[in-house]
Image (tube, helix red, strand yellow):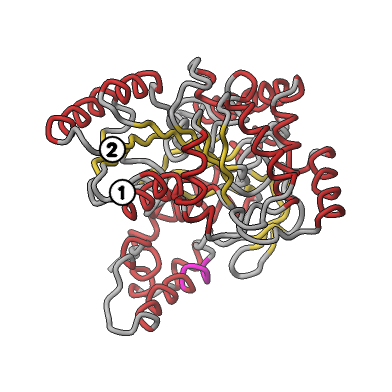
Amino acid sequence: MEASVAKLSPEDRARILNQSLAHFRNPSGADLIKRTERFNAFIQSRAEFGLWPYSRALERANGPLTAVSDISAAAREGINFAAQDYLGLSRHARVVEAGIEAMRQFGPHSAGSAVLLGNTKLSLELEEHVAELLGLEHVTLYPTGWAAGYGAIAAFVRPRDHVVMDYLCHACLQQGAASATPQIRHFIHNDAEDLKARLQSIRAKDARNGIMVITEGVFGMESDAPDLAAFQEACHAWGATLLVDVAHDLGAMGPGGGGMIAAQGLAGKIDLVMGSFAKTFASNGGFLASHSPAAKQFAKYYGSPHMFSNAVSPVQAAVATEAIRIVASDEGERLRARLFDNVNALRAGFASEGISALGTPSPVVLVPFGNDKLASLATRRIAESGVFVNLIEYPAVPVDHARLSMQVMASHEAAQIAEAVARILQARRFAEQDLQLWRASAP
């Protein structure tokens, strides 16, 4: 890094490190394609100096140790804290065999939209298992978790209705709300009192139209959770419907793998629950669950991603179903205990060096960096040291609120956790030196 910084011109330094994705969000110009070229030049400049940590690819199966190639096609082997496979089920023998058997029986393809002939007996079986896990009888499947979040809002909310949502909700929920109604209010993160005030304000003016309140079981960018009982109580008091996204916590947390909803004693008591199979359940796809058969039918025909996308494939359905069986078993309890041993060990490793991971223990351990430049330089150093992590910066979080997102697996070993902490801390120290050199050589 020292040599590359010393050789850079002031113009190169400004282009590579003084800009971020925030600078290219709103391009100008009449040619919609040509105006993207400045952003592509920015990516290529960053990549040339090893400072573009996105669009990586696994070179072999995901696991605690793996091999990853970056945008330059350079491959490295290392300790993997960048994959969302919280219980390590993607390599579980029963899960793999379930996928193989589904391929033998049905092939890889869903035959169309789930509204037409895209379902199989495997996808219907998956609906039943999701319903049992959540304590909610009626489940609609979607082709991705994103589609489930977007579709859950698009199905029920109309322009005259209101959405009241945590301002840190996932992008699929934000964009689903924006597509459904202009009447959107954001409440202070996890603040039930602020939510109540906004609901009261709406109902003082509008007693006729619907209100959807949206939050998450565990927020992936903060590793924290709301008081769901207070939220559901507020919704009942003001005639609103609560939607909770459980993508990060379902399966990996809570008694029986029921996520934060079960951990707070609310299994089967939330109005609408949506989530993804992409984190704990070793598959792709998403779902929406409720107690209402009418809501299920409405979500199928008016939640457009369900109707206008091909259904979850037979392989995806079989894999997710087998993963749920394991999640709900005694083995699942042991895996969750192992996962949280690892989560706590990782957080403690950073705490021993004076770095407090954000939020509370969850499968996502967030290591704060703040300064975007420091985080970018450190991420390069971390990758060179043979540790894979995810850099979280704008637009996922505000500018200069960067953090590392470390996805913990039950299958990580204690030695891997200790080694990753040591390498990341050393990389941070080197990155601080890099940043000082960068600033000292600035014009």
Quarter holding the C terminus is bottom left
431 displayed left or right of 34? right
Instruction: Please say whether residue 282 is visible from this viewpoint.
Output: yes
Residue at (81, 55) in percent of width and height: 106
> What secondary structure predominates along the stretch shown in magenta?
helix
Disc 1 from disc 2: Cα separation: 8 Å
According to the image, label 1 marks what residue? Answer: 158
Choose the circle earlier in sequence order: 1 or 2: 1
Is any atom of residue 425 visible in this view? no
* Mark 2 closeness class: few <14, some 14–19, many ≥20 residues within 10 Å: some
- Between 189 and 413, the one lying in front of the other is 189
Q: Based on the picture, tell me whether residue 47 belongs to the magenta stretch.
A: yes
Magenta region includes residue 98 = no
Disc on res. 123: none
**Residue at (47, 25) in percent of width and height:** 360
In depth, the one of 95 and 179 nearer the eye is 179
- Above or below: residue 255 compared with residue 390: above
| Structural crowding at the residue carrying mark 1, measured as other residues with C-alpha within 10 Å and reported as few (<14), some (14–19) or many (≥20) | some
- Residue 127 in the image: x percent, y percent? 64, 38
Read off the magenta span. Answer: 45-49
- Residue 407 placement, left or right of 194: right
Q: Residue at x 82, y 43 (%)?
A: 98
Residue 246 appears at what percent x and percent y? 51, 34
Q: Are marks 1 and 2 in contact (CB under 8 Å)?
A: yes
- Residue designated by label 2: 210
Q: How many marks?
A: 2
- Residue 86 placement (x, y as % from top left): 64, 36
